């Protein structure tokens, strides 16, 4: 059985807001855990701030 779009949205909201899922369905649990893992991975990545300045002007762009 595949998850409906509505159910995926509800699981996404629960995962991003830090709520528990409240379901024992293995398909829903795996989707919930996948989202939580992606969120944890994003927290570990460094955020590049600012605008990179490059002074190399391509040929023909004078």
Image (tube, grey):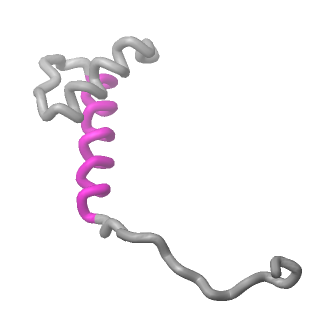
Q: Which residue shows up at 39% across the image and 70% down it?
A: 50
Assign the N terminus to one quadrant of the image: top left
Magenta span contains residue 35: yes
Q: Is residue 41 above or below residue 57?
A: above
- Left or right: residue 55 compared with residue 61: left
Residue 20 percent coordinates (x, y):
11, 27
Instruction: Give the image quarter of residue 59.
Output: bottom right
In which quadrant will I find the C terminus?
Answer: bottom right
**Which percent across, then down, holds residue 10?**
29, 18
Location of residue 12 in the rendering, given as x and y in whole percent from the top left corner: 30, 28
Q: Is residue 47 magenta?
A: no
- The answer to which quarter of the image holds residue 28 is top left
Give the magenta-colored segment's residue range. 26-44
Measuring 59% from the left and 83% from the top, which residue is drawn there? 54
Determine whether 13 is above or below 35 in the image.
Answer: above
Q: Nearer the viewer, residue 30 or 17?
A: 17
* Vertical position of residue 41 compared to residue 11: above or below: below
In the image, residue 33 sits, relative to residue 4, either above or below, namely below
Instruction: Name which quarter of the figure residue 41 lies in.
Output: bottom left
- Horizontal side, residue 57 vs residue 43: left or right: right
Q: Nearest the camera: 19 or 29?
A: 19
x 43%, y 12%: residue: 4
């Amino acid at each position: 059985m595949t998850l409906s779009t509505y159910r995926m949205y509800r699981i996404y909201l629960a995962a991003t807001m830090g709520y528990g899922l409240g379901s024992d369905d293995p398909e829903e649990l795996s989707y919930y855990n996948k989202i939580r893992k992606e969120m944890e991975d994003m927290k570990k990545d460094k955020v590049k701030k600012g605008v990179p300045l490059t002074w190399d002007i391509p040929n023909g762009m004078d």
